[in-house]
Each structure stands twice: as C-alpha cells, then as structure tokens.
Amino acid sequence: MNFTHIFSLLFILLLFVTANGYKILGIFPTMAKSHFIVGSSLMKGLVDKGHEVTVISAFPQSTPLKNWRDIPTPAIVEKTKILIDNVAQKTNPWSFEVIMNLSEMGVWFAEIMLYEPAVQQLLHSNETFDLIILEIFANEAHLGFAAKFNAPIVGISAFGANIWNSDMVGNPSPPSYIPNHFVQLTDHMNLFERIKNLFVVIFERIYNDLIYLPKQKYLYETMFPGDEKPDFYELRKNVSLILLNNHFSVSFPRPLVPNMIEVGGMHIHRERKPLPNDIKEFLDEAIDGAIYFSMGSVVKSNTLPIKKLEDILRVFGSLKQRILWKWEDEELPGKSDNILIRNWFPQDDVLSHPNIKLFITHGGLLSTIEAIYHGVPILGVPVYGDQFWNTLRAEKAGLGLSVPLEDLTRENLDDAIKRILNSSIFKIKAKEVSKIYKDQPLTPLETAIFWVEYVARHKGAVHLKSGGQELSFIEYHNLDVWAIILMAFFIPLCLVQMCLRSICRKICRKNKKEEVSQKKPKKSKKQKEN
C-alpha cells in the first residue's frame, strides 16, 4: 500500500468520525459555578468524543477549546451579585419559604438569560442542533429551545431528583419514604415525620401547579419566536432523558424510571493533577494533618457574620492541624500561622492529598460527592437549600457531623472538629462508602456520554419513556379512579340512607296518627244519634 492509499484511507476515516459527531447545544442558566462544573464536565467529555458543542452559560472558557463555542450570559452574574452576597446572612429558612424562593429565583434566572442579546440572536437564527442538553433548575421555559430547534432534550440536574425533573419523566416519589429536598428527614420516617413530609410535598405541588408553572408558561410563550408553538405542558412531557448528579451510595436509594440516570461525580478527575507547589508544600509538611475549609462557589466566606468569623478563627488558631481556607479576599484579619488562604483551591485534587483529615463544607452536592470519593470525613456547615439534606445524609451514614451555620459557635465548632479528628470511626466509614461509590461498571462521565449519544442515535429514544410521563398529576396518582370508587360506594350508601329515612318518616307519621286516634275521645251512642 503506497502513501496515496494510506492518505486516502485516513481521510475517509476522518470523514467518518466527523460525520458521526453530533451538533449539541448546552444550556446552563444559573450563576452557581458548581452547577456549571457538572454541566461543563459533560460538555468537555462530548467534545473529546468528537462532537461539536455550543454552550450558553455565565462561565465562558478562558482558553478556547476545539469544537466548543461559548454564548456568554454576563447579565446573570451582574444582576445576582447582591443576592449571592446576602445568602449567608439568612440561614435555615423554613421549608415553604425555600420552595417559594428557589422557584422565584429560577424564573428570574430563566428570564435574564432569555433577554441576553446573544441568546436572542441564536433563537432567531437558522442554526440546527441534533440534541439539546439543558440544566433543569426551575427553568421549564427553556424547554422552548427544543421547540425552536426541533431537537430532543436531555436534562441534567446538579440538584438531584426533585419535582422539577421527576415530573418531566414521570418518576415516582412516594412521600412515605422519599423525603422532600427541603425537609431534614431520612428515608426512615416515623408517623409525625411522614405527616410533616406530606404537608411539604402537598404545598410544593399546589404552589408548583398554581403559581410557579404558569409563570414559566408565560415566559415560554412570550420569549420564544413563532406563532404556532407546542403547548407548554405537552412540551414538558417530551424530555428524553434526565441525568442526575447523584448516586445511591451517597444518598437515600429511590426508584428511577429508565430515562432517569444517576451520574453523580462525573466532574471528579479520575487522573490526579499535580497541586500548585505552594499548596503541595503546605500539605506535605502538615505533620499533624490538614483541614480543608470551603463554603462553596455561592456562599462567600468573607460575607459570613462577624461573630461567626471570629469564632472560626479562634478555633482554627487553637488547632495543631494546618488549615486550607477558601477566602475571597487577599487578607484575612486575625489569621493564625497555620492557615493558608486562597480565593480558589483545586478542591478535587486537594481532597485527594493523604494529609487531609477533614473537610469542613457548606454541604453542596458536588463537595459531598468529592469528599465521599476521596474517603474524607465531613463536617457540614449548611446554609441554604439542599445543603441541610446533604449533610444530614452524610451524618446518618456515619461520614461526619453537621453544625448548621445558624448554630455555629466557638464551642460547637471546636467540639465537632475534635470529635471527628479524635475518632477513627468517621475515617473508616468514609473509606467504606468511598469503596462502594467507586464500584461502578463505568465512570459516571462515561455513563453520561453513553446515554447522551444513545438519545441522539435513537432520535429522542421515545421507547425509554414510561406511560407515567404522559399522565397528568390526577391521572398519575389515580385520583380520578379513587373519586369514582368513592362515588360508587357513597352513592348507593346515600340512596339506602334516603330510603331508610323515608321509611322511618312514614312509620313515624303512621305512629303519630295512631297516637292521635287513641287520644281522641270516642263519641257516645246518644251523641251519635244527635
């Protein structure tokens, strides 16, 4: 075979690979960088597989990537800065308030993104896509992208299974053992807890159907071009697949329909990256071990209440362990010598260091999964949303403890840290759960890529959809059937009751007539003749 033949063969193979690549639109509407980390991991994996991606997000790539096009949405970051800075000031709100706030926030994010000029330009273009990957976070209006580009949708949730995504694929969520995300309960509830969970579930359902979804419907109908758009509620039933940033080893097991797939931890590096020299040296020399402290990408440590910052600094200063603290300013007043601050740490790689003995975290799902993957005990300091639920699950699994920010004092923090560091139980349990989590046939990213390509290959994979995906809430829960059964039972009962009452009335009238007849004096013979 000469050089010409080899070149021709390589060229044909190149054309074959290119022809089998899909053109994919990724939409990530939130300003939470942790959410985007999940989505971007999938999009980068798809690029590596030869697909061409367009990504709408607030976090464009700093270094251009081949086959990756960014459509940035800077307005989301600008308009939500004040909101984010105030998150840590209000902790542990009641469940109903969290449900309403997150829903309203989602509508707001969805609207801001749709008003971006670059997004509107895309919506009014003639571009085509084979598939759309959409982060599902209180943004059902964005399902309009599927209508615009006539492409199947794969949803991705950094938040786990919830009402927003479960409804789209008809996934069962029995409130008897599936706790609502915003209630601090486990999958083993007593009677009182089941009542509490049911009330929250009912409230969320009513609020979702009567207030929240109509707002998303209005946004969809007004912001997407075209006079003859598909019905909003029918469009919600057309989602082909949901990818969950979750895994049964790090959460409570629950039923899942075939087109809801767990891929929790697909953002974790399977090959370790070298740490920056200063961080590596700081950790290598930590003879007594080190603690990593981060409040995530949304809550800023420098916005914590002053009293709580003072308590944290005093506790850290009294420890013999070294502390890596994600701190968003150049200076930290009162910092002791055993503390190293950085605006951002390569968290995944830091947690893999053998000298890390404890991870103090806000309890975000990404952070929780990373800690479990690396077998590091957790001290949760939840602030908002599902963080309370995530840290509760870790505590119940024996991986660590939880001290909500609202209850954080010098004494509580010091006690929790020393309990974890001075007991080998937490480390042993963390390693056990890590072993269970890692025991998977494919990596989460490989699983996610397989199913994305599967949906694209099979033009939406309609065969994956369950019948429950087509039903309304009333039909799904057989409420109409139960209504008929109750009517079939009560109507004859009511008829029997009416008959008995009628008979009783007749008997009563007859008895009254007889009583009146008996009481009435009889006429004498003489009176009759007269």
Image (cartoon, helix red, strand yellow):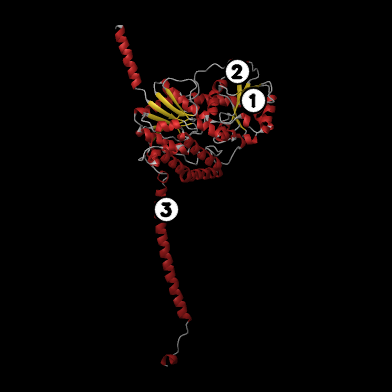
* 21 sits left or right of 302 in the view: left
* Residue that numbered label 1 is attached to: 421
The image's mark for residue 279 is: 2
Please rate how many residues cluster around mark 1, counting C-alpha atoms within 10 Å: few if below 14, some from 14 to 19, many from 20: some
- In percent of width and height, residue 485 lies at 40, 52
Residue 10, picture quadrant: top left
* Residue that numbered label 3 is attached to: 486
Q: Secondary structure at mark 3?
A: helix
Q: Is residue 58 above or below residue 530?
A: above
The quarter of the image holding the N terminus is top left
Q: Secondary structure at mark 2?
A: helix
Instruction: Give, as a three-letter code, the residue at label 3.
Output: Leu
* 411 sits left or right of 91 in the view: right
Asked if the residue at tag 3 contacts the one at tag 2, i.e. Cβ–Cβ closer than 8 Å, the answer is no
Q: State the CA–CA distance, disc 2 to disc 3.
A: 68 Å
Which mark sits nearer the N-terminus, 2 or 3?
Answer: 2
Q: State the CA–CA distance, disc 2 to disc 1.
A: 22 Å
